[in-house]
Image (cartoon, rainbow, N blue to C red):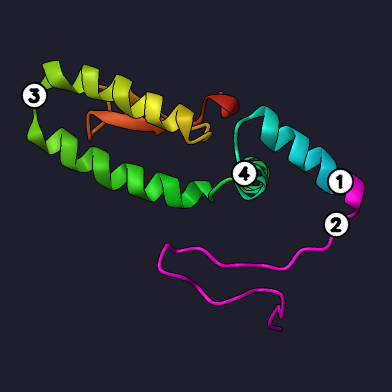
Amino acid sequence: MRDSSVGADNDQGTVQIALRISPSLRERIKAAADANNRSVNKELTTALEERYPPDQDLTFGKLQRLLDTLWRQGDPAKMAARAEAINRSLEASQTRLRFVISPGDPKGWKIVDPSTD
């Protein structure tokens, strides 16, 4: 079933949707947007991104391909710094996954979910 409130994609990879909310909710959103120096649209988008983060399976697949490429480059001294940078990026993307250098692993590294340990 097609949602008639969803518009066509635009050049920026976004869609436009129609949304009905109460005036009081709009005022709360506007106040939050003003406090955060953002537009109402950006405030809503940020709140929705936090509530509905990207699928971790996609993050995992992209991460695994990236790590395979980095590991094949082979400089262990640079891998520690890269691992730190990768983990900072993972934290910023709000995923629980972490990259760990693991000499005992056949690949030499692994991806872990600390919340399952």
Number of callouts = 4
Query: Does the CB distance between marks 2 and 3 fall below 8 Å?
Result: no
| Image quarter of the C terminus | top right
Element class at badge 4 = loop
State yes or no: discs 4 and 3 in contact (Cβ < 8 Å): no
Which residue is label 1 attached to?
A: 25
* Residue 75: assigned label: 3
Whole-percent x and y of residue 88? Answer: 39, 24
x 51%, y 46%: residue: 56
Name the residue that disc number 2 marks. Answer: 21
Q: Are marks 1 and 4 in contact (CB under 8 Å)?
A: no
Q: Tag 1's secondary structure?
A: helix
Front position in the image: 31 or 103:
31
Q: CA distance from mark 2 to mark 3?
A: 54 Å
| Viewer-side label of 4, 3 | 4
Report the front residue among 68 and 31: 31
Q: What span is colored magenta in the figure?
A: 1-24
Counting residues from the start of the chain, the first of labels 3 and 1 encountered is 1
Tell me the kind of residue under disc 3.
Asp
Q: SS of the residue at dot 3?
A: loop
Q: Residue 89, image x and y in percent? A: 39, 30
Mark seen at residue 39: 4
